[in-house]
Each structure stands twice: as C-alpha cells, then as structure tokens.
C-alpha cells in the first residue's frame, strides 16, 4: 500500500509541459522521482521550465511544434533515440480560440483541431513502440489525455472548436483504451476545470470572481489538484482503471458551475 502512487524511475513525456497544467503535472512527476521530458512550441519557455524543475529531479526540454506531423515525427524520433521505453505519455498540449459564431474562422477551427486532437493521436501512434516496450501485465504503460470540462458540458464562451476538440479527446481516450488494453497500455483522460494558466488568464481576469462563486468549492484549481490526479493515473493506484475521464474541477461539471 505504501507504493501505490510510486512513479520513481519511470520515464514520462508531457506535451505542452512548459507552462500551465502541463508544468503542474511535470512538477508533480519530477518531484516524485520520474524522468520527465517536456515539449512545447516555444523553445525559451520550455528550456526555462526544464531548468527550473531540474532543481528537484530530472526534467529535459525538447521543444517541437506538435501541431504538424513533421513536428510529431521529429519529437518521437528524438525520444526514441534517447530512450528504449516510455512508461507515461501525457498528451496535454492545447490551444483555444474564441470568436462569435457568425464570424468563426476556418483558421480558428483548424488550429485548435490540429493541436488538440490531431497532434495527440499521431504522437501516440509514433510513440507506441516505446510504450509497448514498457508495458507488462504487472506494470502497464499509461497514456493520459488532458481534456476539459468544456468537453463534457457546453461552455458559455464562444469557443466552438475548443469544446468540440476536448469532447473528441474524451472519445479518443475511450477508443484508444479499448484498442490498447490487451497490450497492457491503459488510456485515461482528465477534464480540468479552471486553473491558473495562460490559456485561462483572460477568462479569469474578466470572470474570475463569478467562476469562483459558482464553483461548489468556491475556488479555482491549484497545482497539487491536477498533479494528484495525474499521479494516480500514472501509478499502480490506477492499475484497474482505463477508458475513463476524471473531472478535476471542484465538482462544477457534476454539481453545477459557470465557465
């Protein structure tokens, strides 16, 4: 029982790991003994985050643009050159776009879909050999997809491609889980509510008090909240769990709330 949440010595990849929820998960993994690779489109923030987290353990920056197949293949090749197996893949990189329905652009649709759905699927595909090399009946490999409560319930904001992409991540999780469970690879997703991040900064600046007041716990998420769920899904504690989406939102998606 003392080792239920142990991930010491595990090799993890976290996309979008330079800031926000990705950084929160990376920090939790590094401080609990995993060797963590983070990637993001912008090299300087990615390198800076890896340097900062390396004070607590091993965090390596490999900046790539995972919205393109070229970027996905380049990143997967570099991981494959460095590691013989991969224990944990966290598909977190994401983008949002807000625009009124009457003028919502193709650019706003395609950019979000490429980053939020296309990238995670093809990165998972390219990293499957390393995940399979790690996976055993006793110690299963893990894929953790970061969805959103906006993929569970329609948001009030006009972020149509974002909510649709996150609903797609929930179904992609279930589909991958069904396909890969026989290969000892568990696939689950997390649906975060509002957390302090660059993506949420504008919304929290204008609606923060309203969001907190409507939340059943009267607050937004803290780094330990999302890191705890991610640790559960990466460890022995969740060895009998696959194909599920766990809300991490203070109860707002189930008990009512505003976002």
Image (cartoon, rainbow, N blue to C red):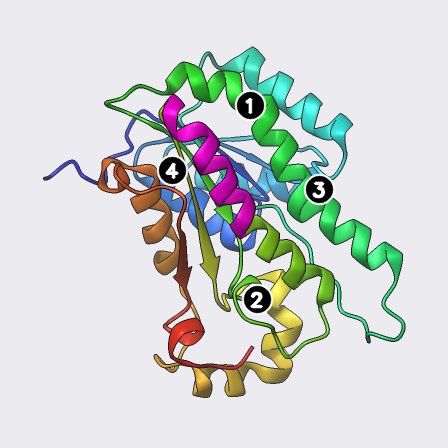
Residue ID for mark 2: 150
Q: Earlier in the sequence, mark 4 or mark 1?
A: 4
Looking at the image, residue 71 sits to the left or right of residue 151; the answer is right
Say if 194 sits above or below 35 in the image.
below
Assign a secondary structure to mark 2.
helix
What is the C-alpha distance between the residues marked 1 and 3?
A: 22 Å
- Seen from the viewer's position, the closer of residues 236 and 30 is 236
The residue at which mark 4 appears reads as 30
The label on residue 42 is 3
Instruction: Please state if 140 lies on the left or on the right of 201 as rendered.
Output: left
User: Which residue matches tag 1?
Assistant: 127
The alpha-carbon separation of the residues under discs 3 and 2 comes to 26 Å
Residue 58 pos. (x, y %) = 41, 30
Whichever of labels 4 and 3 marks the residue nearer the N terminus, that label is 4
> Callout 2: few (<14), some (14-19), or many (20+) C-alpha neighbours within 10 Å?
many
Per the model, the C-alpha gap separating discs 4 and 3 is: 21 Å
The image quarter in which residue 156 lies? bottom right
């Amino acid at each position: 029982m003392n080792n239920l949440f142990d991930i010491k010595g595990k090799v993890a990849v976290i996309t979008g790991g330079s800031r926000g929820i990705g950084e929160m998960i990376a920090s939790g993994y590094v401080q609990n003994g995993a060797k963590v690779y983070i990637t993001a489109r912008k090299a300087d923030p990615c390198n800076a985050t890896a340097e900062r987290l390396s004070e607590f353990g091993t965090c390596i920056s490999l900046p790539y643009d995972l919205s393109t197949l070229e970027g996905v293949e380049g990143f997967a090749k570099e991981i494959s050159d460095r590691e013989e197996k991969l224990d944990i893949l966290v598909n977190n990189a994401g983008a949002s776009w807000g625009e009124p329905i009457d003028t919502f652009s193709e650019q706003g649709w395609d950019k979000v879909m490429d980053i939020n759905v296309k990238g995670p699927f093809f990165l998972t595909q390219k990293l499957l050999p390393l995940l399979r090399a790690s996976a055993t009946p006793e110690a299963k490999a893990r894929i953790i997809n970061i969805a959103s409560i906006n993929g569970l319930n329609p948001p009030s904001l006009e972020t149509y491609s974002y909510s649709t992409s996150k609903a797609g991540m929930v179904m992609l999780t279930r589909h991958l889980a069904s396909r890969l469970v026989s290969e000892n690879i568990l696939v689950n997703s997390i649906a975060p509510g509002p957390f302090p991040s660059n993506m949420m900064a504008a919304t929290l600046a204008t609606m923060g008090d309203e969001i907190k007041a409507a939340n059943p716990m009267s607050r937004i998420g803290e780094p330990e909240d999302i890191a705890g769920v991610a640790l559960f899904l990466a460890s022995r504690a969740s060895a009998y769990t696959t194909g599920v989406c766990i809300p991490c939102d203070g109860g707002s998606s189930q008990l009512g709330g505003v976002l």
